[in-house]
Image: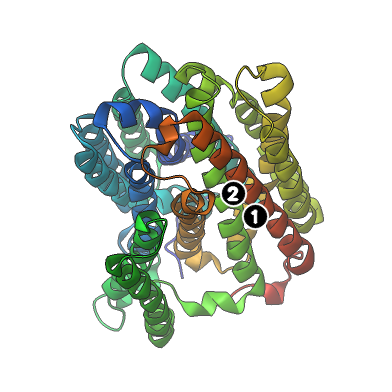
Amino acid sequence: MTAPAPALRTGSAAGRGTLLAAILASGMVFLDSTVVNVALPRLGAELDATVAGLQWTVNGYLLMLAAFVLLGGALGDRFGRRRVFLLGVVWFAVASVLCGLAQDTGWLVAARFLQGAGGALLTPGSLSVLQASFHPDDRGRAIGTWSGLSGVSTALGPLLGGWLIDTLSWRWIFFVNLPLAVGVVLAALRWVPESRDEEVSRTGGGRRRFDVAGALLGALALGGITYALIDAPAPGASPAVLVAAVLGVAAVVVFVLVERRRGDTAMLPTGLFSSRLFSVLNVFTVVVYAALGGFTFFLAVYLQNVVGWSALLTGLATVPMTVLLLVGSPRAGALSARIGPRLPLTVGPVVAAVGLLLLRRVGPGASYWVDVLPGVALFGAGLTLVVAPLTTSVLGAVSDRFAGVASGFNNAASRAGGLLAVAALPLLVGLSGTGYEQKGALADAYRGALAWCAGLLLAGAVLAAVLIHRPRGEGRAPS
């Protein structure tokens, strides 16, 4: 049972304030998932980074989000969703300052790990607060609005980042989080109601223990596999890489066994996967967000180092995605509520894949209107059909008392998808060392990477068409 909380309405001051806090906070996390991509060429040159250094700059952040966002959801359910949410916001802001002050790649990567840990605390809270606080009649609208505007920050990141990089320095892409964090804290203290899973809180000191082992095993699994993919040399794997790969795979197996043994007391109760819809939606999430992560990693570097655009122009290239997400996500959420998630989640990836195939043709001297805009617009339209229906469907597939855990796991799945894509794609397309500074090598890698990403999207479309259906009462995970 969940602690009673005010049934907020979207038209009330408290409802709008709660939405504002959730959107700004998740916006910081989503923005920092993409804004760094635009800065990679500039910070790579200033800090003398290799391709592996750039990968870790992105993946250090994603690794902590993917590994510990489950822990953040469980902490919120147990100790109070608003309390843990606020802790994450402050942590994230402090880590952002450390990122902006970095003097070498090692410092920056370490700070990005810390930033990801803060994001893991606040990300599930931003969504579970909405799920627990809003009236059932307004919950879908609130989540749809959150999905759309939070998704906008993902697309807006490259534009804002490009302006800051060209005008000031790449360091300001991190310092900009400070005023956003202040706004979140003030809004949350004023309007966000506290909520928690009272059953977890009552049994937390006795039968149910904090699942540190599960969190550490998840981190070890993702960390080992990521290290093996990023540091694998071209001719063959070194002993350290092989050991990391074995440890990562072994940690996956042990993680599943540990969580299954704990049952409903686990950080990730395996009973959630009795809902086939929940399971399939999370596999779909990994596949689609892998394509998104790989695409955004390569596009920003390619447009600057091969096409010759500035950081600001590179950011401007993705503005159509921002507009489409802003306008279309609430409508896509409403459409999914009427007809079910299957059609949007099937059509969306196909449209996005067509956009990526068009973008493979972009080369030096490319015209934005003729060569870039059509592909970006199609990719954005496809993403718009996916984001809100996916989020709403994941939460609708489980009991309300598992809102924090479910949103945490789905966030982990999306981050893991992007993490694995950024780790694996350079290896698959033969990009290493300082190859990102060489136009010929980067151009070949870019075209190969976008082909892989389009293939992932089409695989997601097939998955949705075959296995995703409108949820029924018996399809929800047991409470």
Q: Residue furthest bottom?
A: 261
Q: Nearer the viewer, residue 398 or 344?
A: 344
Q: Is residue 348 left or right of residue 309?
A: right
Q: Is 416 rendered above or below residue 335? A: below
Q: Is 166 rendered above or below residue 153? A: above
Q: Is 262 rendered above or below residue 455? A: below
Residue depicted at 28% across the width and 25% down the height: 171
Instruction: Give neighbour class at mark 2: few <14, some 14-19, many 20+ (Cα, 10 Å).
Output: many
Q: Does residue 12 appear in the picture of this structure? A: no
Quarter of the image where one finds residue 393: bottom right
Q: Is residue 147 left or right of residue 312?
A: right
Instruction: Give neighbour class at mark 1: few <14, some 14-19, many 20+ (Cα, 10 Å).
Output: many
Q: Point out residue 18 in the picture as x, y percentages from the top left corner.
A: 45, 39
Q: Are marks 2 and 1 in contact (CB under 8 Å)?
A: yes
Q: Point out residue 301 in the picture as x, y percentages from the top left corner.
A: 47, 31
Residue on which the image places disc 2: 291
Q: Which mark is residue 469?
A: none
Q: Point out residue 374 in the picture as x, y percentages from the top left corner.
A: 73, 27
Residue depicted at 55% across the width and 22% down the height: 307
In the picture, the quarter occupied by the C terminus is bottom right
Q: Point out residue 88 in the picture as x, y percentages from the top left corner.
A: 30, 47
Residue depicted at 46% across the width and 20% down the height: 311
Q: Nearer the viewer, residue 243 or 3?
A: 243
- Residue type of the residue flagged with mark 2: Ala
Q: Does residue 345 appear in the picture of this structure? A: yes
Q: Secondary structure at mark 1?
A: helix
Q: Is residue 297 left or right of residue 372?
A: left
- Residue type of the residue flagged with mark 1: Leu
Q: Which mark is residue 456?
A: 1
Q: Is 475 rendered above or below residue 357? A: below
User: How far is disc 2 from disc 1 in space, using C-alphas?
Assistant: 6 Å
Display coloring: rainbow
